């Protein structure tokens, strides 16, 4: 189900709209695997990788997607792990684009990482 989200594009947010409510974000969250919604504010996922170089390579792929989409997550990584947090800063909460970007992150993750 996340593949249909991954095929979409992030829509630029200009602010002035409310963030997604909890019920709506819960419905969208069901379309993703392994992501959590933290405090109704942001999506978060931690990926396991085989080593530091693999974590860095994944971060670089996510960064390329983020630049192409104009929607930038918070990224943290270390030896064997990458953590991604995503939300729409202009509304200080979640929008559809956050779920699209989450699905795109899943799509560029390689299990061998």
Image (tube, helix red, strand yellow):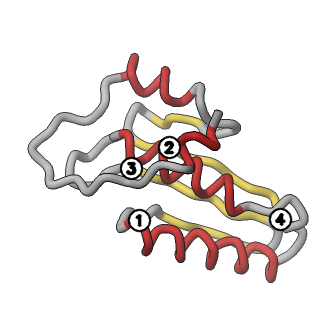
Mark 1–mark 2 Cα distance, whole angstroms, equals: 17 Å
In percent of width and height, residue 15 lies at: 14, 50
Question: The residue tagged with tag 4: helix, strand or loop?
Answer: loop
Circle 1 is placed at which residue position?
A: 69
Q: How far apart are marks 1 and 3 (CA)?
A: 14 Å
* Element class at badge 1: helix
Q: Which residue is drawn at 38% across and 62% down?
A: 71
The image's mark for residue 49 is 4
| Residue that protrudes farthest toward the left in the picture | 16
| Picture quadrant where residue 56 is located | bottom right
Disc 2 designates what residue? 43
Q: Quadrant of the C terminus?
A: bottom right
Q: Position of residue 62 (x, y in %)?
A: 58, 69
CA neighbours of label 1 inside 10 A, class few (<14), some (14 to 19), many (20+): some
Tell me: 54 left or right of 46. right
- Check residue 23 in the rendering and tell me which mark sits there, or answer none: none
Expressed as whole percent of the image width and height from the top left, the position of residue 52 reads: 80, 79
Residue for badge 3: 87
Which label lies toward us, 1 or 2? 1
**Nearest the eye: 2 or 77:** 2
Q: Do the residues labelled 2 and 3 touch (CB within 8 Å)?
A: yes
User: Which mark lies nearer to you, 1 or 3?
Assistant: 1
**Real-space CA distance between mark 1 and mark 4, rounded to the nearest whole angstrom:** 24 Å
Disc with the residue nearer the chain's start (1 vs 2) = 2
């Amino acid at each position: 189900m996340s593949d249909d989200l991954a095929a979409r594009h992030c829509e630029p947010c200009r602010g002035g709209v409310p963030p997604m409510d909890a019920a709506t974000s819960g419905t969208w969250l069901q379309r993703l695997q392994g992501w959590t919604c933290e405090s109704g504010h942001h999506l978060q996922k931690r990926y396991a990788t085989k080593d530091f170089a693999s974590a860095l390579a994944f971060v670089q792929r996510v960064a390329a997607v983020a630049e192409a989409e104009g929607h930038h997550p918070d990224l943290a990584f270390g030896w064997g792990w990458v953590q991604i947090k995503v939300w729409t800063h202009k509304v200080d909460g979640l929008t559809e684009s956050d779920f699209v970007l989450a699905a795109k992150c899943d799509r560029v993750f390689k299990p061998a990482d």
